[in-house]
Image (tube, rainbow, N blue to C red):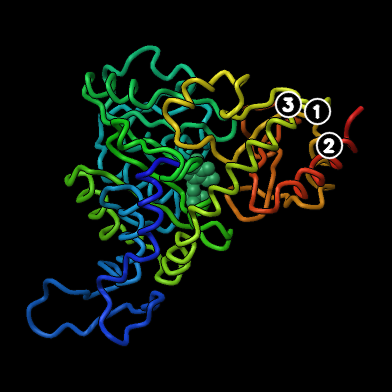
Amino acid sequence: MSETAKSRAAALSHLRRGRLAKGDPIPLPLTMAAIFHAPGDATGFDQYGRFSNPTWDAVEHMLAHLEDAPCVAFPSGMAAISAVFFGLLKSGDRILLPSDGYHTTRALADRFLKPFGVAYDVRPTSTFLDGGFDGYRLAFVETPANPGLDICDITAVAEAAHKAGAILVVDNTTMTPFGQRPLDLGADIVVAADTKAPNGHSDVLFGHVASRNEDIIAAVSGWRETSGSIPGPFEAWLVHRGLETLEVRFDRMCASAEIIARRLENHRAIKGLRFPGLESDPSHNLARAQMERFGFLISFVLASEDKAEDFINNCALMQAATSFGGVHTSAERRAKRGDAVPPGFVRLSVGCEPVEELWQAIEASLDGVSG
Ligand SMILES: Cc1ncc(COP(=O)(O)O)c(C=O)c1O
């Protein structure tokens, strides 16, 4: 982790310190309120739960500290992505999406943007630069892409997109601000599902938009207030608590993923292994240049659907679950969600378990489906 990331991590749990009055609770109080005391002039304070809430403010303050940019919180990652699309696009615009990223982003464009006159095209993440960005209002990348873990060069895409007059949105869900810093690499907007590693305990959905452009922040805040796509205070409170341990969890998860990926490389049951931290990975050089860590996701292919299911279901230290980034290791056979991957394709999310115990459980389950 770079020095800046370390100092950002160190300050994270003390952000409230400067705002405390004598006798205030040190942990964040949860404010459950739809209405606030509002006599007289109706400006400059919390008034109504669709406009603002002190618990959101606190979590947004933490996210802004991590992103080094103003942030707007949303009730899920998809709500954050929707706010960018519906807050910034208008009929007649054309956008570019990854063909191999999270499938619901494409579904959103297809089912809800297209009927409003916003056209979209798709491109693979690994060749996202090919073809340029002329005619696009917005380019959206996810790197590493979920689930295939291909990567694209954020700096190069940002430069080319800007030259063509497009803005660049990066879905940074797979990396978190501790793993990759798209705004520093030239992106205009970061969106993320804090449902994953930032909350980390798989008990809440949440998302945010980060941008250093005040017009963009005003547009997505306006969308939130007007559409009512607001996070619940309790969810915000849980994410605030999750963020306090993000750095330590993320560090453990990434370190364990590197160890496990290296061992998987030599296992006879595994084909098509992808982990950006492996020297053999096609994205490794770019990953070294643009990512602070290599992440906690690993993907690979087992011989068949049954073998992949058995591997996941028979591993004592693995949850069979969609999503990723939780403290518990989890895995999913992604073909069952409709991703264009082989039937035996597994996306593995490495959790916080001690790595030797975790590896023993993974190896035992893999040995059970080998041969
Ligand atoms: C890369 C990525 N972006 C966005 C989302 C959407 O997040 P949420 O489920 O919180 O709406 C997901 C969910 O899996 C995801 O993987």
Q: CA distance from mark 3 to mark 1?
A: 6 Å
Cα–Cα gap, marks 2 and 3: 12 Å
For residue 328, side relative to residue 251 (left or right): right
**Residue lying at 76% horizontally and 31% vertically, measured from the top left:** 344
- In the picture, the quarter occupied by the N terminus is top left
Residue 147 visible (yes or no): yes
Place of residue 308 in the rendered image (x, y in percent of width and height, measured from the top left): 79, 36
Which residue occupies the foreground of this view, 114 or 187?
187
Q: Are marks 3 and 1 in contact (CB under 8 Å)?
A: yes
Q: Amino acid at mark 3?
A: Glu
Q: Single out the residue that lies furthest toward the left.
A: 41
Q: Taking 131 as reference, is 254 left or right?
A: right
Q: Position of residue 110 (x, y in %)?
A: 44, 34
Label of residue 265 in the image = 3
**Disc 1 residue type?**
His
Give the quadrant of residue 371.
top right
Q: Amino acid at mark 2?
A: Leu
Secondary structure of the residue carrying tag 3 is loop
**Residue 275 falls left or right of residue 5:** right
Residue 88, placed above or below residue 163: below
Of all residues shown, which one is farthest toward the front?
3
Which disc is residue 339 wearing? none
Q: Position of residue 75 (x, y in %)?
A: 42, 59
- The residue at which mark 1 appears reads as 267
Which quarter of the picture shows residue 191?
top left
Q: Which residue has dot 2 on it?
A: 366
Labels 2 and 3: the sequence-earlier one:
3
Quadrant position of residue 119: top left
Q: Are marks 2 and 3 in contact (CB under 8 Å)?
A: no
Residue at the image position 47 percent from the left and 66 percent from the top: 241
The x, y position of residue 85, in whole percent, is 32, 41
> Could you say whether the residue bearing mark 2 is in a helix, strand or loop?
helix
